[in-house]
Image (cartoon, grey):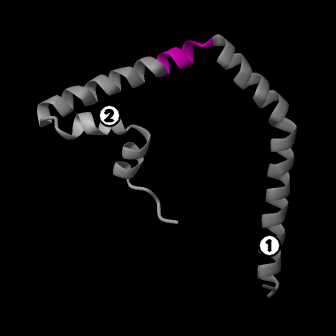
Amino acid sequence: MAKKTIEETVGKKYPDFKDEVDGLSTGDLEARLTSLAKGRQETRQAQDDDLALEESKARTSELGAPYSDTLKEIDHKSRYIAKLIKEKGGK
C-alpha cells in the first residue's frame, strides 16, 4: 500500500482547513504557518508542564523496565548468535 501524500492526509482529516488555506496568498499562508508554529510551541510547553503526564510517563517507564531489559538482552544474544553462525559458514 502506497504511503499517502500530505495533500491526501490533510484533505481526509482536515477538509475544512484544506479548503480554507488552498486559496490563501503566500503572505497569508506564512502568517498561518507562524500561527501554527506558535500553537505547536504552546502545546509542547503545556505538555512539558503537565505534572500528571510526567508522573505517568515515569511510572510507565518503571513498570516496563524489566520487559525492556529482557528484550534488549534477547536481541543482543540473538544478534551475537547470528554473527557466530555467519562467521562459521552457516546461513
Mark 2: few, some, or many residues within 10 Å (few <14, many ≥20)?
Answer: few
Task: Verify CB contact (< 8 Å) between mark 1 and mark 2.
Answer: no
Q: Earlier in the sequence, mark 1 or mark 2?
A: 2
Residue 14: quarter of image = top left
Dot 2 amino acid type:
Phe
Say which of 23 and 47 sits in front. 23
Label 1 to label 2: alpha-carbon separation: 51 Å
Q: Position of residue 44 (x, y in %)?
A: 48, 22
User: Which residue is label 1 attached to?
Assistant: 82
Mark 1: few, some, or many residues within 10 Å (few <14, many ≥20)?
Answer: some
In this rendering, the answer to whether 42 lies above or below 23 is above
Dot 1 amino acid type:
Ala
Mark in the foreground, 1 or 2: 2
Q: In the image, what residue occupies the spot 16% across and 29% down?
A: 28
Q: Position of residue 46 (x, y in %)?
A: 51, 15
Q: Which residues are magenta?
A: 44-50
Q: In the image, what residue occupies the spot 43% across and 56% down?
A: 4
Q: In the image, what residue occupies the spot 80% across and 73% down?
A: 82
Q: Is residue 51 left or right of residue 65?
A: left
Q: Position of residue 20 (x, y in %)?
A: 25, 33
Which mark, by number, is residue 17? Answer: 2
Please tell me whether mark 2 sits on a helix, a strand or a loop.
Answer: helix
Residue 81: quarter of image = bottom right
Q: Is residue 16 magenta?
A: no
Say which of 61 and 35 sits in front. 35
